[in-house]
Image: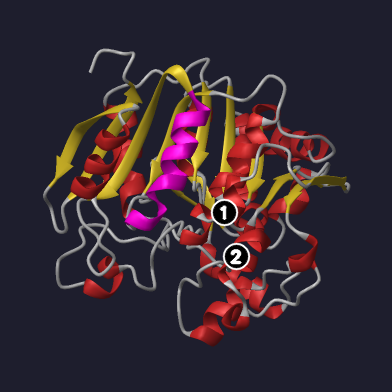
Amino acid sequence: MSFQFNFTIGETESRSAECELHEDSPNLINKEENSEANKLPLGDEVQTGTTDNVKETELMTSSCKTNTFNSGNRSHDCLAEEKALATEHKPPEDVSKALENKIVESISGLHFVNVSVVEMTLSEGDSYSENIVNRTVTSKSDLISGVYEGGMKIWECTFDLIKYLEDHDIDLEGKSVLDLGCGAGLLGILALKRKAKEVHFQDYNSTVIGEITLPNALANCDIDEFSECSEEEHSLKRQRKSKSKAGLLSKCRFFSGEWSQFMRLMQNEVPPKKYDIILTSETIYNPDYYNALHDVFQNLLAKNGTVYLATKSHYFGVGGGVHVFETFVKKKEVFCIKTLKVYDDGLQRQLLSLFHENKVC
């Protein structure tokens, strides 16, 4: 069986278009995150609403709500407020619907939907207000800052971290795990397979969560549960299961929105949410976004928790990378940061861990 994957293995220096990330940057968080709009006390101007499948928490001013979207003509402050939307997405009651018109592929025991098929379906009729596929086609870019943040790609370093977690038998059993900037959600899905107590998936775009992450989680829950069934049993059990949520889904929650507002949403829970493990891939490419990322780590990582971060050593044209991020972290004096592994094939990549300084560095 052949598979089509939207990622590259063994990148070389010559592939500068992808490495520079001026168009292909994953999980971009605008530097407006660090604006005055994000310095509001917790709970300021919070409104909540509930639909059948979506629970929303909005931190937006009324002046921005009344404006139509046109990023080319908007002020930075207003754009930052528009993006300050943290949304929790609920799985459908009939889980089979999330996998309708999806082609499921596999690698390393992980199942995920074919992104090209999803993009084609969305381009024909995008039910999401983001309309990210048509916008990226129109702009001839794989990323539009503040509109689409690269979550429909599976980035190479994700597989570095998956392999490391498996090869080193990292203990995830019974742990509370966050897949930050999750995209396809493969890191969080691996945590589920390794018996995590709960896994939260976060990505900037609601389209990514609804059309990629959530279906991927469903595909893995579904396939695992029926892997030992006969063909006859499989058909009958799948029919019964389609009327209720997959068992593993009870451990999952799904969120869209930018980092700082997702952090505030979790802090507003009772008790405030803390994660034992935070998994994240290719999120340190731009130094302008380090404050927001560090704030998530500082406020949501449990006292004895660990961040596992996969990254390229340097992102050309953007200025981010391991050295710059390590310098930033050390100046904050909150975390110890260690290099776990270096990959020298093609463009150099690294795996890092962060943990609070109360632990032995």
Residue 288 painted magenta: yes
Picture coordinates of residue 124, whole percent (x, y): 69, 79
Q: Is residue 249 visible?
A: yes
Q: Answer yes or no: do the residues labelled 1 and 2 have beta carbons within 8 Å?
A: yes
Q: Which quadrant does the C terminus fall into?
A: top left
Q: Residue at x 50, y 58 (%)?
A: 151
- What amino acid is labelled 2 in the image? Asp
**Which residue occupies 45% across, 30% down?**
298
Q: Residues within 10 Å of mark 1 (few under 14, many from 20)?
A: few
Q: Which residues are magenta?
A: 287-301
Q: Is residue 344 left or right of 202 when viewed as pictured?
A: left
Is residue 104 toward the left or the right of residue 218 in the image?
left
Q: Which mark is residue 77?
A: 2
Where does residue 50 sit, x and y in percent of width and height? 87, 45
> From what the image shows, is residue 121 above or below residue 241?
below
Q: Nearer the viewer, residue 212 or 144?
A: 144
With 317 as the anchor, is 49 left or right in this view?
right
